Amino acid sequence: MHYEKLSIPDVVLLTPNVFGDERGFFMETFRQSEFENHCGPYQFVQDNHSKSKQGILRGLHYQHQHPQGKLVRVTRGEVFDVAVDMRQHSPTFKQWVGVRLSEKNQHMLWVPPGFAHGFYVTGKEAEFQYKCTDYYAPADEVCLRWNDLTIGIEWPLKDGAQPQVSAKDAKGLTFERAPTF
Ligand SMILES: Cc1cn([C@H]2C[C@H](O)[C@@H](COP(=O)(O)OP(=O)(O)O[C@H]3O[C@H](C)C(=O)[C@H](O)[C@H]3O)O2)c(=O)[nH]c1=O
């Protein structure tokens, strides 16, 4: 597995070693010891799996009192995945980083606790699977507006069209109103 710190150094891109043969492929997708060395002493307690159609945008979400670290990957299709630093004492506070995760590149992204997270489906569809360092706490969830002007995420929207978001995400908070860490 290759680990690469991105422009927000606590956000790490993981690239697994893929072993292909005439049957298909094999890859290790997680090793606790390696992960701790490169990303920190985190343990995962919940796995999630969602499927989304092209043009869907999920997020930006985070839990405030029970923040979740997320190790995310795409097992079918492609997404543009974004993490926003919501930690007010961080040198990269308010900054965002985005990467394309796909079935093809097999990339994974470590999004630490303290970040808002979301993704936009750039392929025909996307199956999104991820590990979380804390349990789902719906009452604790915060939704940051995907197109907040302060953060200014440059989503690769298809033909500049508006993404399809849930009713909840359409009512996301502006950055000024969103709680920070
Ligand atoms: C997140 C979650 C949801 N649910 C239930 C609640 C709803 O009945 C249904 C859909 O939930 P929601 O619309 O919040 O799902 P997403 O929009 O994919 O939310 C996720 O999207 C962004 C990208 C994230 O980073 C978070 O992991 C998460 O907030 O699943 C659960 O039962 N457990 C869970 O952990």
Image (cartoon, helix red, strand yellow):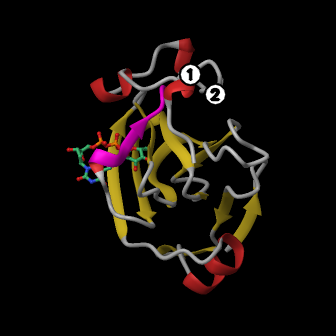
Instruction: Answer above or below: position of 88 versus 57.
Output: below
Q: What residue do we see at 49% from left, 13% from top?
A: 161
Q: Secondary structure at mark 1?
A: loop
Asked if the residue under mark 1 is in contact with the one under mark 2, i.e. CB atoms within 8 Å, the reply is yes
Quadrant of the snapshot with the N terminus: bottom right
Q: What residue do we see at 51% from left, 44% from top?
A: 117
Q: Position of residue 62 (x, y in %)?
A: 45, 46
Mark 2 and mark 1 lie on one chain; the one further toward the N terminus is 1
Q: Local crowd at mark 1 within 10 Å, few (<14), some, or many (≥20)?
A: some
User: Three-letter amino acid code at disc 2?
Assistant: Ile
Q: Position of residue 134 (x, y in %)?
A: 40, 65
User: Three-letter amino acid code at disc 1?
Assistant: Asp
Q: Position of residue 30 (x, y in %)?
A: 53, 76
Residue 51 visible somewhere in the drawing? yes
Q: Local crowd at mark 2 within 10 Å, few (<14), some, or many (≥20)?
A: some
Which label lies toward us, 2 or 1? 1
Q: Residue at the bottom extreme?
A: 33
Instruction: Answer above or below: position of 90 versus 71.
Output: above
Is 122 left or right of 105, judged from the image as shown?
A: left
Is 149 left or right of 135, judged from the image as shown?
A: right
Q: Which residues are magenta?
A: 139-145
Mark carried by residue 153: 2
Residue 146 visible somewhere in the drawing? no
- Mark 2 to mark 1: distance in Å? 8 Å
Q: What residue do we see at 34% from left, 59% from top?
A: 48
| Viewer-side residue, 71 vs 19 | 71
Q: Which residue is mark 1?
A: 148
